[in-house]
Image (tube, rainbow, N blue to C red):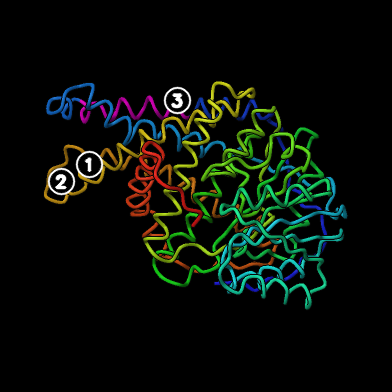
Amino acid sequence: MIPKLKPIDSQVVTRDNHLYIPVVGKFWISHGFALLWLGASIYIAYPWLKDLAYHVSFPLALLIIGGLAYIPGYMNAFLVISLILDRQPPFKMDSPHEEITILIAAHNEEDKIFQTLQYIDKQDYLGKIKVTVINNCSTDRTINEVLKAKNKLSTKIELLHEEKPGKFHALNHALKSVSTRYFITLDADTLLHPASIRHLVSRMKSSPEEVCAVAGSVLVKNSRENLLTKMQEWDYFLGIASIKRLQGLYQGTLVAQGAYSLYKTKCVQEVGGWPDAIGEDIVLTWRLLHRKWKVYFEPLAVAFTEVPSSVKHLVRQRARWARGMIEGLHEVKPWKQPQIFVKYMTGVNLIMPYLDLTYTLCWIPGLILAFFGNFLIVGPMTVFVLPLTLISYSILFFYQRNFVFRSLHIRIRKNILGFILYFLGYQLIMSPVSVYGYLQEVFKFQRKWK
């Protein structure tokens, strides 16, 4: 569903800050709580470990329970306390007017590109906006729709052509002609809230000089389509947003996603633009972080994107994301990242294949065994981590409702069934798909943009 978007009054967003805790303090407080949770988990789950070790050996039992309970519990505890301690600083400038460029790589987007350009045309941003659409081997009427928008809309639109297939080719081609200090990348199917660009640029202008990019907040616009899109609505609204807030708190958002992010032009040019990778935005971000620059996240810079409505396309998308993460790890090793928080955040990604493999090979078969009364792998102790997950979702839900949606005059649509399915079954899809993506990268399968 595409929300009814209205402009909001220009105002600096402020929040009460009764007690200031530096970022490093929040980092170690969150870790302290997570370690306490881990210790309690190990103590309480000892009978489960002992029983499983009797059947499969102690090392294997430790690997299984570590991947199903210990590490996920530790990570969720760290996430919960970090979200509680997070305080997004207010804007120092709420109405920037610096000229910006928006880059849109388009491949067969005839049914979406005109509406995307219309929403850009309705922005309340005070500065000049120049849009560059890069047609990348389209075989439909994408060019015609761009030309129609160029004639009908007030925003300045330039159309470029890139004959080499691949989003990174299209963006690098356009980067050569960017003359503004900042530019935004936007997917051709993504619609912007009227105040979105203003908030995105405001966060950049209110940030320290070493901040080179700000990731926008991407939500789902076609959530009413079917059960799959209903689940993804909650994934973007809670799951992805919580990780973005966590990483943004520690000044190392790991993906300034190509779907909607703001970059300093000179920084992207200095690292050579987008790499030849299926996860080009992931690798680009890690290259920027490797230069000791920082990447922030702005929850008020909201955009609405179209998510896959079929299992086939969802599998392709999420496998591509998982593969992109492996590309990023190969490009820049976590221990080579110069900033301590970034070392930790990228280091967490090193264990994601282990967690996804454990979930795929142990949790799913364990659920089947539990259905027939065998609780050797999945039993009462395995749900010990669920309350923390629910708490983290609750914290983020109230934050999104009170500080984001209410400020932007957007209503949260009731989607109870989607939430139940997301909470209980979404990972049953995502972990096997991620494993598939890891295997694609290991065996160097052919890459596909979509």
Are discs 1 and 3 less than 8 Å apart at CB?
no
Between 392 and 276, the one nearer to me in the picture: 276
Between 283 and 17, the one nearer to me in the picture: 283
What residue sits right under mark 1 in the picture? 378
Q: CA distance from mark 2 to mark 3?
A: 31 Å
Q: Residue at x 66, y 55 (%)?
A: 403
Q: Secondary structure at mark 3?
A: helix
Numbered mark located on residue 110 in the image? none
Q: Quadrant of the N terminus?
A: bottom right
Where is residue 351? Give x, y as percent: 41, 31
Are discs 2 and 3 less than 8 Å apart at CB?
no
What residue sits right under mark 2 in the picture? 369
Comparing labels 2 and 3, the label whose residue is closer to the camera: 2
Q: Secondary structure at mark 2?
A: helix
Numbered mark located on residue 35 in the image? 3
Q: What range of the chain is rendered magenta?
A: 34-49
Q: Is residue 247 magenta?
A: no
Q: Secondary structure at mark 1?
A: loop
Are discs 2 and 1 less than 8 Å apart at CB?
yes
Q: CA distance from mark 2 to mark 1?
A: 8 Å
Instruction: Tell me the kind of residue under disc 3.
Output: Leu
Q: Is residue 38 magenta?
A: yes
- In the picture, measured across the screen, residue 38 lies left or right of residue 201, that is left
Where is residue 436? Give x, y as percent: 35, 45
